Image (cartoon, rainbow, N blue to C red):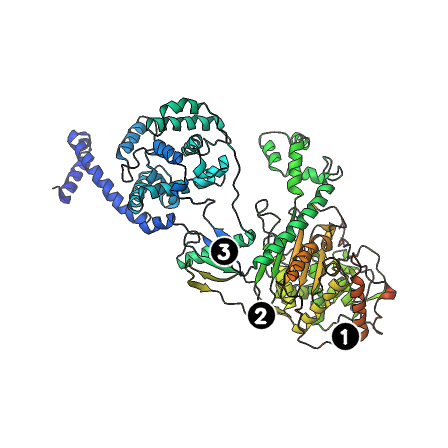
């Protein structure tokens, strides 16, 4: 036996006399030592390859389940879009084609086919690269792409071989075939033979005939190159090669070969979309958080069968989905009609020309050397391109969120009209100007300073110097009445002139402080006077949380999405403690503000809640519309549900081009109105629940009677009433407590907010 000392001595002599490396004796030594070196290197790599337990886990994949509070499945977290089928549910034609083409000695080897490996090495050395991997080796790559890799290196091949041997030790041959066919990718987000059969032939895997089976197995040599959708000729040639291999290996009668090879592909392509469940944006929002939790606890979100229990109520989620879908269709019809007109989507429109210049097609033309004006002219004349661009840009979007103001539980979450069409989340990712839904923070700051809803200000033109020669002149789309108006009416009818004066009294910094305390905690707020009218972009999630704090009398509760995580057997892994309410705002002022916001629903801009949707529960809320009707908002407060909606377009330059439909009262309010109507009818939300006042209030009897009369009149009006004429307004206090001149936005027709400065607004 050769000792280590003698090997060292021989190696040292070769280094002193390198010409001896060319001798026959030296070459024989090298050839003898090479297998030993490879073996030693392979042993070193063993700890760096997947363990048997990892292999078994990969086969028995159990995706985590996301459940609603009432036990309904919301989503499953799969690492790929596939449906696992057992081997007996796969057509025998598939198995025959696979073995004949990829590994005809599959049942004879133990993971490695030495004859095939040696043959591939020789062919590669001759300049004809050939793959020598068995089905088991390919499965190793499919299961563990990161651990093994795909580079052409000795290390990768050794890792692949070691893992293949482990797989053979862990699985039966049939299990290997089943696992392989369920994990191989087939393009178009289709993983596994079942999804491939549905994608390319619109049938299940057990129904594939010999031609279809040969086509799919032929793709494995190069899915993109042999794609039957984009490269049908290549795919047909490759399919015929597979059929020849099946004849060669005794898997197909030779008499059938020629007739079959003459047959066309007959692909019936249908892209398979991943089923995301009733709350896809909510599920995607949680994915990163859940992966981090699972990693920290030693679990896999995709294979350990975790059960995540959430706060979503499946019934409320269904109502929210229906309401968003219905109103989305209504608004899309409005948008389509408006933008189909020549004056909307015409080639001479400056906006349309800008959108064309921003398109990928325009940039591609420029990159190819085309002159900018020629590229623009050509695309503007391309009717198919222009129609496609218009559809993309004028697609109405929406967001909806409902939350329990007491517990912080998120009850329903709709991030867009269609997740597959637009996965962007308009609940927590989109920042848009909130318009008049921001006004309660202005009045809340005033109430905290001792103001009362019965205090009056003059409804008159307002000018607020901003410095540098700039002047802010907020308007209401109609001349001011030059009559006193209470703060309560100013908020109910969303008068910009009144709100701006209140802002001037309390100051932008204080308003921003109130908004942040109540829940607007991620979006930056610009502390300028126009902040009163909602000019700083925020998210719908922040606004619903802030209104929840108002409903909860100034107590902020962090939104809760998950209550507990269990293993597949129901064992509790972690329970998430409910958040502690945080007193962030004066409770008496919050109560006053909440009660004042009833006015918008009872007699102001949101009376459709009463008149159109018949909701007689104790609710309060606020509409919001931004400049040029770009964004529509509405948030409704109930003692146990705060629901908010936003409607608009992804591109803020696009609008509904309608002063009627663009208002929050007509774009966003219907989503919340239908949602609450259905929730109350089903008794999921209790209509008899009322806000509880923790502090005594003593409104005048006259004021209470007037509010009751306004509410009763509102029941018989189909449109939000205009603010009462001066003669019909409640009698002003004998000596109005006038705050320094101030202003506000959003009545049934919301005016633009104007800031006049040198050079334009």
**Contact, mark 2 vs mark 1 (Cβ under 8 Å):** no
Q: Quadrant of the N terminus?
A: top left
What residue is drawn where x is 47% and y is 44%?
A: 81
The residue that disc 1 covers is 699
Q: Secondary structure at mark 2?
A: strand
Q: Tag 2 or tag 3, which sits nearer the N-term?
A: 3
**Contact, mark 3 vs mark 2 (Cβ under 8 Å):** no
Q: Secondary structure at mark 3?
A: strand
Q: Position of residue 384 (x, y in %)?
A: 65, 32
Q: Secondary structure at mark 1?
A: loop
Instruction: State whether residue 350 is above or below residue 726.
Output: above
How far is disc 3 from disc 2 in space, using C-alphas? Answer: 29 Å
- Density class for disc 2 (Cα within 10 Å; few <14, some 14-19, many ≥20) is some
How far is disc 2 from disc 1 in space, using C-alphas? Answer: 29 Å
- Density class for disc 3 (Cα within 10 Å; few <14, some 14-19, many ≥20) is many
Q: Residue furthest right?
A: 727
The reply to whether residue 531 is in sight is: no
Q: Tag 1 or tag 2, which sits nearer the N-term?
A: 2
The residue that disc 3 covers is 66
Q: Position of residue 679 (x, y in %)?
A: 64, 60
- Density class for disc 1 (Cα within 10 Å; few <14, some 14-19, many ≥20) is few
What residue is drawn where x is 53% and y is 52%?
A: 284
On residue 501, the disc is none
Instruction: State whether residue 207 is above or below residue 518.
Output: above
Relative placement, left or right, of 288 versus 138 is right
The residue that disc 2 covers is 582
Relative placement, left or right, of 593 versus 157 is right
Along the line of sight, the residue nearer the viewer: 113 or 376: 113
Along the line of sight, the residue nearer the viewer: 371 or 399: 399
**Contact, mark 1 vs mark 3 (Cβ under 8 Å):** no
Q: Position of residue 240 (x, y in %)?
A: 41, 26
Please state which of the two labelled residues, at mark 3 or mark 2, is closer to the viewer.
3
């Amino acid at each position: 036996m050769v000792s280590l000392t003698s090997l060292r001595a021989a190696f040292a002599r070769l280094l002193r006399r390198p010409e001896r490396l060319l001798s026959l004796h030296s070459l024989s030594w090298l050839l003898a030592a090479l297998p030993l070196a490879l073996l030693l290197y392979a042993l070193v790599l063993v700890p760096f390859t997947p363990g048997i337990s990892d292999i078994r886990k990969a086969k028995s994949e159990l995706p985590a389940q996301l459940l609603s509070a009432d036990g309904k499945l919301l989503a499953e977290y799969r690492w790929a879009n596939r449906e696992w089928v057992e081997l007996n549910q796969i057509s025998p034609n598939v198995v025959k084609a696979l073995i004949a083409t990829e590994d005809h000695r599959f049942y004879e080897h133990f993971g490695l086919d030495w004859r095939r490996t040696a043959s591939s090495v020789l062919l590669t050395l001759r300049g004809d690269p050939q793959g020598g991997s068995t089905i088991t080796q390919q499965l190793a790559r499919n299961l563990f792409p990161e651990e093994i890799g795909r580079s052409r290196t000795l290390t990768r091949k050794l890792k692949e071989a070691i893992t293949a041997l482990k797989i053979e030790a862990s699985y039966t041959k049939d299990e290997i075939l089943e696992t392989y066919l369920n994990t191989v990718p087939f393009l178009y987000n289709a993983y596994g033979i079942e999804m491939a059969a549905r994608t390319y032939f619109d049938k299940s895997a057990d129904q594939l005939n010999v031609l279809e089976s040969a086509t799919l197995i032929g793709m494995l040599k190069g899915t993109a190159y042999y794609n039957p959708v984009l490269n049908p000729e290549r795919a047909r040639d490759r399919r015929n090669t597979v059929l020849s291999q099946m004849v060669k290996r005794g898997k197909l009668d030779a008499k059938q070969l020629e007739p079959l090879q003459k047959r066309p592909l007959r692909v019936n392509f249908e892209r398979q979309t991943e089923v995301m469940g009733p709350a896809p944006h909510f599920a995607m929002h949680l994915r990163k958080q859940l992966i981090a939790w699972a990693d920290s606890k030693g679990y896999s979100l995709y294979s350990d069968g975790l059960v995540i229990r959430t706060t979503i109520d499946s019934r409320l989620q269904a109502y929210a989905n229906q309401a968003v879908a219905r109103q989305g269709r209504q608004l899309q019809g409005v948008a389509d009609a408006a933008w189909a007109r020549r004056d909307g989507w015409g080639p001479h429109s400056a906006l349309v020309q800008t959108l064309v210049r921003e398109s990928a097609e325009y940039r591609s033309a420029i990159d190819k050397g085309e002159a900018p004006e020629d590229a623009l002219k050509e695309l503007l004349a391309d009717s198919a391109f222009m129609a496609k661009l218009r559809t993309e840009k004028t697609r109405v979007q929406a967001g909806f969120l409902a939350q329990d103001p007491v517990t912080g539980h998120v009850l329903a979450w709709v991030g867009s009209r269609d997740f597959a069409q637009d996965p962007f989340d308009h609940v927590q990712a989109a920042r848009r100007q909130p318009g008049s839904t921001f006004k309660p923070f202005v009045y809340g700051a005033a109430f905290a300073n001792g103001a009362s809803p019965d205090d009056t200000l003059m409804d008159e033109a307002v000018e607020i110097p901003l410095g540098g020669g700039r002047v802010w002149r907020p308007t209401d789309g109609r001349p001011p009445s030059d009559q006193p108006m209470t703060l309560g009416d100013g908020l109910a009818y969303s008068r910009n002139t009144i709100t701006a004066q209140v802002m001037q009294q309390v100051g932008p910094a204080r308003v921003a402080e109130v908004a942040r305390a109540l829940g607007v905690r991620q979006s930056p707020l610009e502390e300028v006077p126009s902040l009163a009218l909602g000019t700083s972009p925020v998210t719908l999630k922040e606004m619903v949380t802030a209104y929840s704090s108002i409903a909860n009398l100034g107590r902020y509760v962090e939104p809760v999405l998950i209550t507990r995580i269990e293993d597949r057997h129901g064992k509790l892994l972690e329970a998430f403690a409910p958040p502690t309410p945080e007193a962030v705002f004066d409770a008496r002022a919050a109560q006053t503000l909440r009660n004042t916001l009833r006015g918008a629903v009872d007699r102001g801009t949101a009376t459709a809640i009463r008149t159109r949707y018949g909701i007689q529960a104790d609710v309060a809320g606020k509409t919001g519309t931004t400049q040029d009707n770009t964004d529509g908002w509405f948030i409704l407060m109930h003692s146990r549900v705060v629901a908010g909606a936003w409607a608009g377009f992804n591109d803020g330059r696009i609008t509904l081009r309608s002063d009627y439909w663009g208002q929050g009262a007509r774009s966003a309010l219907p989503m919340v109105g239908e949602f609450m109507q259905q929730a109350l009818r089903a008794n999921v939300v209790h209509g008899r629940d009322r806000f509880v006042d923790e502090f005594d209030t003593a409104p005048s009897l006259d004021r209470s009677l007037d509010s009751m009369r306004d509410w009763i009149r509102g029941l018989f009006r189909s449109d939000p009433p205009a603010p009462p004429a001066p003669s019909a307004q409640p009698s002003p206090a004998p000596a109005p407590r006038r705050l320094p001149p101030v202003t506000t936005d959003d009545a049934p027709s919301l005016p633009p907010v104007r800031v006049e400065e040198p050079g334009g607004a």
